[in-house]
Image (cartoon, helix red, strand yellow):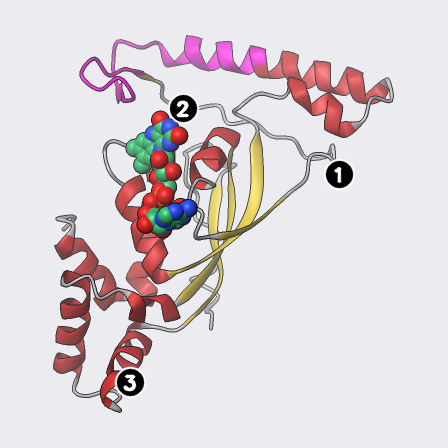
Amino acid sequence: MESSNLTEPIDVLEDGKSFLRLVEYIGDDFGIVQSARVSFGQGRKTEEEDFKLIRYLMLHNHMSPFEHIVFKFHVACPLFVRSQWFRHRTWSYNEISRRYTSKNIQFYIPERFRKQDLSNRQGSVFSDEINNDIARNTVKKQTELALNAYNILIEMGIAREHARIVLPQNMYTEFYATVNLRNLFHFIKLRISPEAQWEIRQYAKAILEILEETVPISLDAFKEKHDLK
Ligand SMILES: Cc1cc2nc3c(=O)[nH]c(=O)nc-3n(C[C@H](O)[C@H](O)[C@H](O)COP(=O)(O)OP(=O)(O)OC[C@H]3O[C@@H](n4cnc5c(N)ncnc54)[C@H](O)[C@@H]3O)c2cc1C
């Protein structure tokens, strides 16, 4: 199932190079109701009863009916976001191979930089005290150096799989990722949290936009359960 508006790429990181795109999806809120009621040999009832059932399932951790709804995304993100994302083992992934191609290499240059958070050792905060122009130029220069080194190695005939060792963490990668709604909610819960890195949080927010359109009742129950409203 898909509609053209829903499958438009969403710009995620303010730099015009990142995106999250819904490729296709299977099922909707009522597919969840249908799967849950098969236990009683029943299907859909009134809208109000269906809504109550979804809320009940969510709030009581009866999550298996959510596994029947499946989403496939196309993602462009920096390598460090990809590393965090791929820790989620319940997704299926296929990624562009830098052993195979040396074309279309792009880098994430943040618009706004963050300071180290003093209370959370893993965290960071946006701050007016930072000169974003200087920070951006510093990253840009380093990135150009790395790309230059890569191109020199490629021109020397060094293999792509070997030359890529000079490419930095802010290089973009692309992948397809497929997941069921239960595990997608788990991902969002962990990655939209203020504990998670700002960049991956933006992807979690973009996924919320898609769920708003595709499974609004389940999303509403999820937000209620996790205090996200
Ligand atoms: C804010 C934040 C900080 C983090 N910091 C670090 C860090 O410093 N270092 C680091 O290494 N990681 C870090 N992680 C990654 C984290 O440890 C998890 O690997 C990641 O969030 C994936 O979560 P998950 O295993 O629950 O998800 P999934 O892999 O999608 O699994 C979903 C659920 O399936 C079950 N499951 C999946 N595989 C297994 C299995 N093999 N055995 C048993 N149950 C399984 C579990 O119930 C799991 O919760 C961080 C994550 C977050 C959100």
In the image, which is nearer the foreground, mark 2 or mark 1? 1
| Residue 30 highlighted magenta (yes or no) | no
At label 1, the amino acid type is: Tyr
Q: How many labels does the image show?
A: 3
Q: Distance between the residues labelled 2 and 1?
A: 31 Å
Mark 2 vs mark 3: in front:
3
- The residue that disc 1 covers is 100
Q: Under 8 Å from ligand 1: the CB of mark 3?
A: no
Label 2 close to label 3 by CB (< 8 Å): no
Residue found at the very far bottom of the displayed protein: 41
At label 2, which amino acid type do we have?
A: Glu
* Residue 226 on image: x %, y %: 16, 50
Return the mark for residue 70.
none
The percent position of residue 70, horizontal first and vertical second, equals 42, 65
Could you classify mark 2 by the number of other residues whose Cα lies within 10 Å: few (under 14), some (14-19), or many (20 or more)? few
Image point 27% across, 22% down: which residue?
123
The circle on residue 38 is 3
Magenta part of the chain: 115-142
Q: Where is residue 156 in the image (x, y as percent from the top left)?
A: 86, 17
**Residue linked to disc 2:** 111
Q: For this rendering, which residue is in front, 94 or 172?
A: 94
| Residue in the picture at 43% in, 48% down | 10
